Amino acid sequence: MNTVISVSGVSKVFNQGRDNRVSALESINLEIDSGEFVSLLGPSGCGKSTLLRLIGDLTSPSTGAVLVNGKSAAQARRGREYGMVFQQATLYDWRTVSRNVQLPLEIMGHSREQREARTQEMLKLVQLESFGRHYPWQLSGGMQQRVAIARALAFQPSILLMDEPFGALDEMTRERMQMELLRIWEQTKNTVVFVTHSIPEAVFLSSRVVVMSARPGRIAGIINIDVPQPRNFETREHPRFFEKITEVRECLRQGETNTHKGPPS
Amino acid sequence: MSQVADLAAPIEQELLPQPGAASRWRDRLRRFLPPAIVFVLALVLWEAVVNIFHIEGFLLPKPSVIAATFIAESSVVFPAGLFTMREAVGGFVLGSLLGIAIALATARWAAVAEGMMPFAIAVNSTPIVALAPIMNQWFGITNPLAKMSIVAVIVFFPVMINTVKGLTQVDAAALELMRSYAATDLAVLLRVRIPNSLPYLFSALKVSSTLSVIGAIVSEYFGGSREALGVYISQQAALFHFGEAWSAIIIACLMGIAFYAILLTLERLIMPWHVSIRATDEE
């Protein structure tokens, strides 16, 4: 396996040199291989979203470096390597579903035929072929989020960055969306970095879970999830699934106690 | 997959039933009937009050008298209305184009916005028709440009302030997405900022449409061409020809409503996606 994303010695400090200085991340080292599904898991304030944003070059590290295929994160972003999905679907109200999916393609200068073909393909992938002409407000939250995934994948980025994409959905929709995402991932073979604060979600989806602890944000441990692939609804009842959930929970708890024992900063 | 069908079902149901033509007419009738009844009752009451209390015609003419004068004077009040409407529309177009242009500049160079906004907001809350006598001096009392420039100044500020708001108050995540596409500033402007500003722009334009008719007529009260509606109203009122004055006021009223309605229609055509238009039985 070849490393795609390499985070080395990264720290992020907000409000540097001021009273409300916050150390969001400290000495983060992480390597992610091509085609991996990695979750960043931790309590709020552990810097998991910040780490994702650093990888996606939406913010830059205070120290250290993020490399993507040997290039800087900024170069990777300019090279359109990232598809992003946020907690809110962030669809553009004034565009229909298919024109939302087309947006990145328009910006990247694809021809109309290419755009339309690609959009059809993507809507098929997320099983919303018949909703192309609808406006976002006419769709349910889960459907909106699927449009957001279709849009993120439309320009075939190699890396999918997802920041709690199912966080605003109800439990049932959420589990269905997790299955959908795995099905899509099996087809597209993207490298996925997925931020969540749900332990079962992280374990169910990931090949590895990066457990983080807060104040300052650090990696408490990285856990391989050797639950058999491909995952399906039976996975959730698999004994290995429960063992891994326990292991992740232990790791989270240890991360917490270490923080409390740690030297006052 | 059946799960998809489950998700889709409630939406299809919401969208599918199109009301038949008959029920649509019934809806319209239900919407327009109450105001129509109120209107007719108000006219009847007005007529009755003037009759019962023997109110003098020069104080408050009866609706029937106004209607008769309106028809008799239509060859005068309609051209006067058109003349004033040209001033209002001319000033409106001038002011809103300028407002939009400055707004685009301020959205591009944040410093311009920071420097200008406090003043724009201050000027926006001053009564601009007060400038009318000065404009009459600058451009000449009968020159339509004098009135157009008043209207333009009235329209400029709300349009500019609202457009700046719409261009800058964009969802942060929407901008981050554009960043992840490595979109140019121009692409962000065209594909996110401008569409985002349209609802703001239209609410300013709708308010400005009525303001511009008011602005044109009030500045004509300070003097203007004999063909102008405002001049006609003030002269007829001075001569105690209240039937004529009221006829002209009806024209002014119709002008304001027509202008507003045109913008409302434009808004619906340009932004069929917008929240305000989704529920069609409002407004």
Image: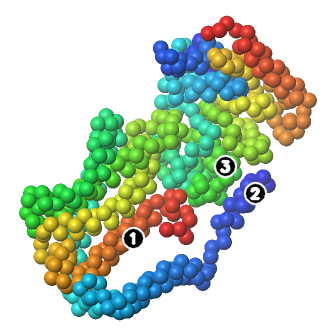
Badge 1 crowding class, 10 Å Cα cut-off, few under 14, some 14 to 19, many 20 or more, is some
What amino acid type should be assigned to the residue bearing mark 3? Gly
Tag of residue B224: none
Q: Which chain carries label 2?
A: B
Say if A97 sits above or below A156 in the image: below
Tell me where residue B253 sits by quadrant: bottom left
The residue pinned by badge 3 equals: A141
**Residue farthest along the front direction in this orientation:** B53
Label 2 close to label 3 by CB (< 8 Å): no
**Residue farthest along the top direction in this orientation:** A263
Tag of residue B261: 1
Tag of residue B5: 2
Tell me where residue A201 sits by quadrant: top right
Left or right of B250? Residue A166 is right
Of the two numbered discs 1 and 2 in the rendering, the one whose residue sits closer to the viewer = 1
Left or right of B199? Residue A130 is right
Taking the spot 73% from the left edge, 9% from the top edge, the residue there is: A261
Secondary structure under the numbered disc 3 in the rendered image: helix
What amino acid type should be assigned to the residue bearing mark 1? Ala
Alpha-carbon span between mark 3 and mark 1: 35 Å
Of the two numbered discs 2 and 3 in the rendering, the one whose residue sits closer to the viewer = 3
Say yes or no: labels 3 and 1 on the same chain.
no
**Residue farthest along the right direction in this orientation:** A239
